[in-house]
Amino acid sequence: MRYPTRWDPFFRDVMTVADLYRYPTQHFDFHRAQLTLTDRDR
């Protein structure tokens, strides 16, 4: 199925069902890494 690649860095022009099932975890991990403080940040 075609997806608009400008919406998200994990979207590709054509994605399989496996890609779609993998997407929520990739998306969550990406944002979790953005919001997680390291010991250096504290």
Image: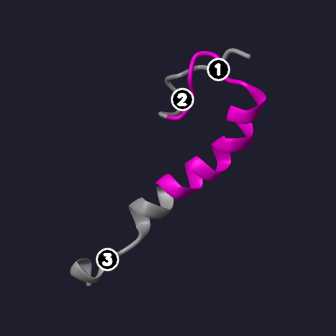
* Image-based side of 41 in relation to 7, left or right: left
For label 3, the SS is: loop
**Residue 23 lies in the magenta-colored region:** yes
Name the colouring of the figure: one colour
Quickly name the residue at label 2.
7
* Lower position in the chain sequence, tag 3 or tag 1: 1
Image: magenta residue range: 10-30
Q: Nearer the viewer, residue 17 or 36?
A: 17
Task: Please state the horizontal and vertical placement of residue 37, each as a whole percent of the image.
Answer: 35, 75
* Image-based side of 4 in relation to 39, left or right: right
- Cβ–Cβ below 8 Å for labels 2 and 3? no
Q: Residue at x 40, y 60 (%)?
A: 34
The residue furthest front is 18
Quickly name the residue at label 1.
3
- Residue 7 figure quarter: top right
- Residue 23 figure quarter: top right
Task: Please state the horizontal and vertical placement of residue 26, each as a whole percent of the image.
Answer: 57, 48
Of marks 2 and 3, the one in the foreground: 3
Is the C terminus in the top left, top right, bottom left or bottom right quadrant?
Answer: bottom left
* Image-based side of 9 in relation to 1, left or right: left
User: From mark 2 to mark 1, how far is it between C-alphas?
Assistant: 9 Å
Is the N terminus in the top left, top right, bottom left or bottom right quadrant?
Answer: top right
User: From mark 3 to mark 1, how far is it between C-alphas?
Assistant: 34 Å
> As shown in the figure, which amino acid type bears the numbered disc 1?
Tyr
- Cβ–Cβ below 8 Å for labels 3 and 1? no
> As shown in the figure, which amino acid type bears the numbered disc 3?
Thr
- Cβ–Cβ below 8 Å for labels 2 and 1? yes
> As shown in the figure, which amino acid type bears the numbered disc 2?
Trp
> Residue 38: which disc?
3
User: From mark 2 to mark 3, how far is it between C-alphas?
Assistant: 28 Å
Q: Residue at x 43, y 62 (%)?
A: 33
